[in-house]
Image (cartoon, rainbow, N blue to C red):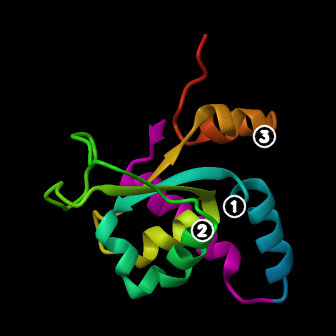
Amino acid sequence: MVKLARWEVERMLGQMQAAARPGPDWAERWGRWQEADGDRMVWVEFPLGELMNPAIAGFAWAWAMQKRLIVGPIQEGDQFNAQGLEGKVRVQTTLSTALLVYRDLPPYRCQVLLDPVLVLARDAGAVAWLEGAGYERAA
């Protein structure tokens, strides 16, 4: 897994918000962004207690009903503002949903991860997407 840095997630969030701005070409802008990036599958992780956060209650309910929540311990490399006692949740979802969850949770309580295999399996354009985010192709 490749954990995206905060600045990368913030940049992607800004791109999504720019694509969603109202205007006469909104549907075309949003459709292009959603097809190019928003539909990509990623993982979103956050401390277990955030499942009770009303800001993401709808997502949490849907994920629970679909049995998509994976619960595990907080790892040393996780940069959550947490003691590590509560554990963490990992969910596979689209980039657009992961960015909305990231936006709605408190700072340092959420991280977005890419699975390079999933990204590269989708289409050849994914290689350019990863390289554009600063990742190099393995030789």
Q: Which residue is mark 3?
A: 122
Point out residue 138 in the picture as x, y percentages from the top left corner.
Answer: 58, 16
Residue type highlighted by circle 3: Arg
**Towards the viewer: 64 or 2:** 64
Q: Which is more N-terminal, label 2 or label 1?
A: 1
Q: How dense is the environment of label 3, judged by Cα within 10 Å: few (below 14), some, or many (20 and up)?
A: few
Q: Position of residue 89 (x, y in %)?
A: 40, 58
3D distance between C-alphas at marks 2 and 3: 18 Å
Which mark's residue is nearer the viewer, 1 or 2? 2
Residue 20 lies in quadrant: bottom right
Distance from Cα at disc 1 to Cα at disc 3: 13 Å
Q: Is residue 97 left or right of residue 78?
A: right
Rendered position, 70 above or below 21: above
Q: Residue at x 71, y 33 (%)?
A: 120
List the residue tagged with mark 1: 38
Q: Which mark is on residue 93?
A: none
Give the magenta part as a residue range.
Answer: 1-23
Mark 1 neighbour class, 10 Å CA radius: few under 14, some 14 to 19, many 20 or more: many
Residue at (48% x, 35% y) in the render: 1
Q: Secondary structure at mark 1?
A: helix
Q: Residue at x 28, y 56 (%)?
A: 87
Q: Are marks 1 and 3 in contact (CB under 8 Å)?
A: no
- The 10 Å Cα crowd at callout 2, few under 14, some 14 to 19, many 20 or more, is some
x and y percentages locating residue 4 in the rendered image: 44, 47
Which amino acid lies under the numbered mark 1 shown in the image of this protein?
Gly
Q: Is residue 85 visible?
A: yes
Q: Main secondary structure of the magenta part?
A: helix
Please tell me whether mark 2 sits on a helix, a strand or a loop: helix
Q: Which residue is mark 2?
A: 97
